[in-house]
Image (cartoon, rainbow, N blue to C red):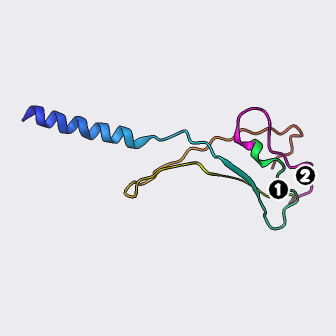
Amino acid sequence: MKKLLSLLTLSGISLCLVAQVAGPQNGTIFSNTTKSGSSRAWINAANAGASDNVYATFGNLSSSMGSYTDYLTATGFGFNIPANYTITGIKVTIERADVNLSTR
């Protein structure tokens, strides 16, 4: 009985550990998504796909109040989530540069 209980306990722990973490997953499709009223579109959106100091950009953005860019959209993460699973958290890491110190 002890061996069976130990086996069942270890199986339960193994299933929990496997189900807790997946990834990291990197996007494969990067694009500019138009946002009504925006001041600038993203240029070279595909550059957002790697940590190589080559960035997607949007040119000069007016410093006036209410200036903003379109959305920079990342998709194609390739998640394979089984039907009965529940996602309890997602961590997103973004690298950016702001040489003019004017990001809002």
Q: Nearer the viewer, residue 64 or 86?
A: 86
The amino acid marked with disc number 2 is: Leu
Q: Residue at the location (61% across, 51% down)?
A: 76
Asked if marks 1 and 2 touch (Cβ < 8 Å), the reply is yes
Q: Secondary structure at mark 2?
A: loop
Left-right relation of 79 to 6: right
Mark pair 1, 2: CA separation: 8 Å
- Asked if residue 83 is positioned above or below residue 93 in the image, the reply reads below
Is 100 situated above or below 30?
Answer: above
Pointer 2: what residue?
A: 61
Q: Which residues are magenta?
A: 48-66
Q: Residue at x 81, y 50 (%)?
A: 104
x 45%, y 52%: residue? 81
Residue 12 position, x and y percent, is 26, 41
> In the image, is 30 to the left or to the right of 86?
right
Q: Quadrant of the N terminus?
A: top left
Compare marks 1 and 2 and give the one earlier in the sequence.
2
Q: Main secondary structure of the magenta part?
A: loop
Please tell me whether mark 1 sits on a helix, a strand or a loop. loop
Q: Is 65 inside the magenta-drawn segment?
A: yes
Residue ID for mark 1: 69
